[in-house]
Amino acid sequence: MFWYPLLILLVGLERLAELVVARRNARWSMERGGILTGQGHYPWMVLLHTGLLAGCLAEVFLAGRPFVPALGWTMLALVIAAQGLRWWCITALGPRWNTQVIVVPGLPLVRSGPYRFGWLRHPNYVAVAVEGFALPLVHTAWVTALVFTVLNAVLMVVRIRCENRALALLDEVA
């Protein structure tokens, strides 16, 4: 049972690494005239993602959720795949990737990495959705998976609208 808390800890450390990258990238963007938008939903995102990690552990330990190998190993593979997709997105966007919505006027849209697929406009959010569903199910924390998935879907509607408005703003500035 020690390995599941270790997995959650590793995912938490990955999130901290993202925040370090995001802070550096925010500085880069703002130095180039970046426009920050959508601050209203950001604290809710932080709360939801923190709640995911806490919920995974709480549900497993408080509700005594078992590890079911066929489900657990499949979900672990999805968690790893989601991490790969997330870092592919971060790498493709380079210094323009951020946890907040910051756009830099004059820069073209990124069309490399997973962003080269026109049918998949927000691949990072696919990674978030897959991980948010799969991470709890590694250890059958189905309530956490369900709650995160529903709340994340609502939040993603807000977030994607915010990003689309920010990108439309760039078209007006250009």
Image: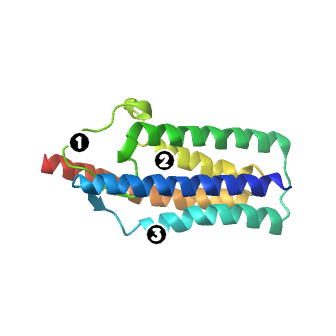
**x%, y% of residue 101?**
35, 56
- Which of the labelled discs sits on residue 107, or is there none? 1
**x%, y% of residue 124?**
48, 44
Which residue occupies 37% across, 45% down?
A: 95
Residue position marked by numbered label 2 in the rendering: 125
Say which quadrant the C terminus sits in: top left
Name the one closer to the observer, 99 or 146: 99
Three-letter residue code for mark 2 = Tyr
Name the one closer to the observer, 46 or 67: 46
Residue position marked by numbered label 3 in the rendering: 43
Q: What element does badge 1 sit on?
A: loop
**x%, y% of residue 8?**
70, 56
- Foreground mark, 2 or 3? 3
CA–CA distance in space, label 1 to label 2: 22 Å
Residue 99 appearing in the image: no
- Foreground mark, 1 or 2? 1
On screen, residue 62 above or below 141: below
CA–CA distance in space, label 3 to label 1: 27 Å
Q: Dot 2: within a 10 Å radius of its alpha carbon, few (fewer than 14), some, or many (20 or more) residues?
A: many
In terms of sequence position, does the residue under pointer 3 or pointer 1 come before the other? 3
Say which quadrant the N terminus sits in: bottom right
Which residue occupies 83% across, 59% down?
A: 65
Which residue occupies 30% across, 52% down?
A: 29
